[in-house]
Amino acid sequence: MSKQVLITGSTDGIGRQAAIDLAKKNYNVIVHGRIDESVNQALEEIQQASGRNDLRGFSGDFESLGQVKQLADKLKDELDHLDILINNAGIFQKERRLTQDNYEKTFQVNYLAHYLLTLLLMPLLRKSNGARVVNVSSMVHSTAIDFDNLQGEQNFVGSKAYGISKLCNVLFAYKLARETENENTTSNCLHPGVISTKLLKQNYGDIGSAVQEGSDNIVYVATSDAVEGVSGKYFVNQMPQSSATVSYEPAVQDKLWEISEQMVAGYLDEA
């Protein structure tokens, strides 16, 4: 039976390429995007590029925790299990903006929405014969975290906010690995490479490698036999590497988890 994989933010960039590559490898890919229109367009393109016509798509705007909850509910209604969750969706904001949930946009879209989605989908992941959760982080993840300025409350710089959100992805991956160490689920994170995506072009110009490189790195961590049973690791170029020292501190992982749990409590209680 083909394994089922959900990729958040898979309507463009490396997420879209990973969807194509995994579909070609006979995975049942579930495409996710912010709105129905982009999802439907991406589905057509991915199906044409992969030669598959059985892929599914779901929309959900990560600026709304309510929509994240609705997305999880739809997935739980339609799927009997989930083998791989790739938390890939991400944005870069030059100015501080708040979501409708009153959280800083970069923090919520890049991290908090994925935290909530992952916890809501754990029942589906636990029904898999060896589930993998993959968080797409970045080599520019922060080397320190100030919980009093977690969302740029005191001062905001777009690049710092992005780095913090990507550190949160790493902290979450490691904490989830600890939480699931006695289960048939693994949790890892990765730096996909400096890839020429829409996000990179908008903020740094036309630099970076082809999206294929980013996809290769994601697909490796998500599917490689060499990563089976491996958990709590940070991968760069398909090799485990060291992430920021602070990311290994259990107390920091625990504090972020507790803060995040409080932020999404209303939606977890209904799960």
Image: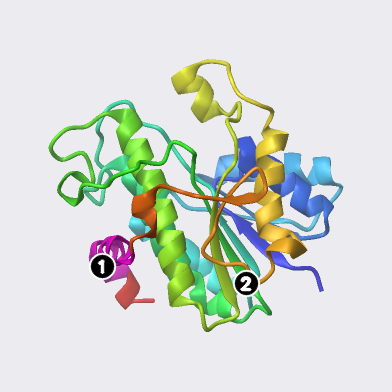
Q: Check disc 1 and give the amino acid type.
A: Glu
Q: Residue at x 56, y 67 (%)?
A: 231
Q: Which mark is residue 258?
A: 1
Which sits in the foreground, 66 or 23? 23
Q: Is residue 171 left or right of residue 256?
A: right
Which sits in the foreground, 11 or 17? 17
From which residue to which does the magenta span run?
250-267
Residue 198 falls inside the magenta stretch = no
* Residue 190 locus on image (x, y percent): 56, 49
- Looking at the rendered image, the quarter that the C terminus falls into is bottom left
Q: Residue at x 50, y 29 (%)?
A: 199
Query: What is the chief secondary structure element of the magenta stretch?
Result: helix
* Residue 129 locus on image (x, y percent): 68, 80
Instruction: Determine whether label 1 and label 2 are within 8 Å by CB.
Output: no
Q: Determine whether the residue tagged by mark 1 lies in a helix, strand or loop.
A: helix
Decide which of tag 1 and tag 2 comes sooner along the chain: 2
The residue beneath circle 2 is 131
Looking at the picture, does residue 132 appear above or below residue 103? below
